[in-house]
Amino acid sequence: MSPRAACRLTQLGFAPVYDYTLGKVDWIAAGLPTVRAQGSRRVLDAVRRDVPTCAPGTPAGPALQQARAQGWDRCVVIAGLGTVVGTLRADRISATEQAPAAEVMQPGPTTVRAHEDLDATRQRMNERHVAHLLVTTPDGTLIGVVDAEVS
């Protein structure tokens, strides 16, 4: 409906008029202000942005060694402008592995969106024994990670 609203506003003489086609989910993912029910929390409220990343061509072992030095057991493989393409997990890849990350990563990791309800997301994570979930924008750009533990 937003294209119609933008068109109508233009017809009424408003200028400039922008049609924000990415929508509310993208707005929230960008951390822009919103109004919500008192006491409700979103995944974005608990996101950790310090998750280690590497490019698809990076040697996997050294990328994981660097992640471990930062206290992580994984490294997120990102391409382009931050699109999540996979993960490297320390329990599956040797620290001496020299193959490019793209060749040994787990492709297509599970992600969650920033606008999702935090408590419901953590409940699902605990039920499925998932300690961490990647948080991305609607177009797959990495925002960070959310932990199952309640802070």
Image (tube, grey):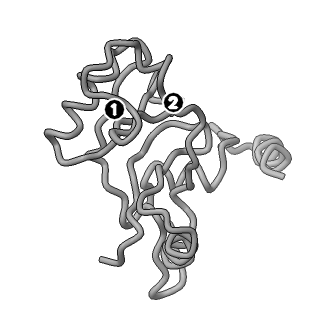
Residue 124 lies left or right of residue 41; in this view the side is right
Where residue 37 sits, quadrant-wise, is bottom right
Q: CA distance from mark 2 to mark 1?
A: 11 Å
Determine the secondary structure under disc 2: strand
- Residue 23 placement (x, y as % from top left): 66, 50
In the picture, the disc for residue 53 is: 1
Where residue 61 sits, quadrant-wise, is top left
What residue is rendered at 37% in x and 31% in y? 93
Residue in front for this viewpoint, 144 or 131: 131
Q: Is residue 116 above or below residue 134?
A: below
Q: Quadrant of the C terminus?
A: bottom left
**How many badges with numbers are in the image?**
2
What residue is rendered at 78% in x and 49% in y? 2
- Residue 88 placement (x, y as % from top left): 41, 33
Question: Can you identify the residue that label 2 sits on?
Answer: 83
- Residue type at mark 1? Thr
What residue is rendered at 51% in x and 57% in y? 114
At label 2, counting other C-alpha atoms closer than 10 Å, the crowd grade (few under 14, some 14-19, many 20 or more) is: some
Residue 23 lies left or right of residue 86; in this view the side is right
Q: Is residue 101 above or below residue 30?
A: above
Name, please, the residue furthest toward the left: 69
In the picture, the disc for residue 35 is: none
Q: Which mark sits nearer the N-terminus, 2 or 1?
A: 1
